[in-house]
Amino acid sequence: KRLNKKQKKGLIYSVGVISFALFIFLIFTGNTKSLFVIFNLDPFYLFLLFVLVFLFNIFNMIRLYYLVKSAGFSMSWKNIFHYSVSGTFAGFITPMQTG
């Protein structure tokens, strides 16, 4: 599915804001080591990170499934996955997870 004009515009704005924030971070701190720390990780810990993120999403989906079931509704696992991941993403990018 292709992005429409409004979605493309939002994506460009998002990338611009993130780039601007990183630029400001570098100007005020002068610390470039923290941006490249991911390249120095031990592969075992990187693998462990991906496993834990995967498990987090699985348990989040199961939680959402039971919440929807207890409310008397039914939802496909595909929709549960989309809601779960988008909710997690919105929580991660908003300050103090108020999203």
Image (spheres, helix red, strand yellow):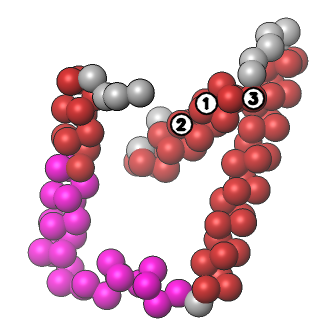
Left-right relation of 1 to 52:
left
Residue sitting at x 70%, y 48%? 57
Please name the predominant secondary structure of the magenta segment in the image.
helix
Range shown magenta:
16-41
Whether residue 33 is in magenta: the answer is yes
Between the residue at mark 1 and the residue at mark 3, the CA separation in whole angstroms equals 10 Å
- Position of 32 relative to 60 (above/below): below
User: Which image quarter: residue 26?
Assistant: bottom left
Question: Does the magenta segment cover residue 22?
Answer: yes
Q: Position of residue 24 (x, y in %)?
A: 15, 66
Q: Is residue 33 left or right of residue 49?
A: left
Label 1, secondary structure: give it.
helix
Disc 2 target residue = 86
Looking at the rendered structure, the secondary structure element under dot 3 is: helix
Task: Determine the residue positioned at 85% across, 27% down.
Answer: 66
Instruction: Where is residue 68? Give x, y as percent.
Output: 78, 20
Residue furthest out toward the front: 1
Q: Check disc 1 and report the residue beneath it.
A: 83
Residue farthest toward the left in the current orientation of the protein: 27
* For discs 2 and 3, the disc positioned in front in the rendered view: 3
- Give me the C-alpha separation between circle 2 and circle 3: 14 Å
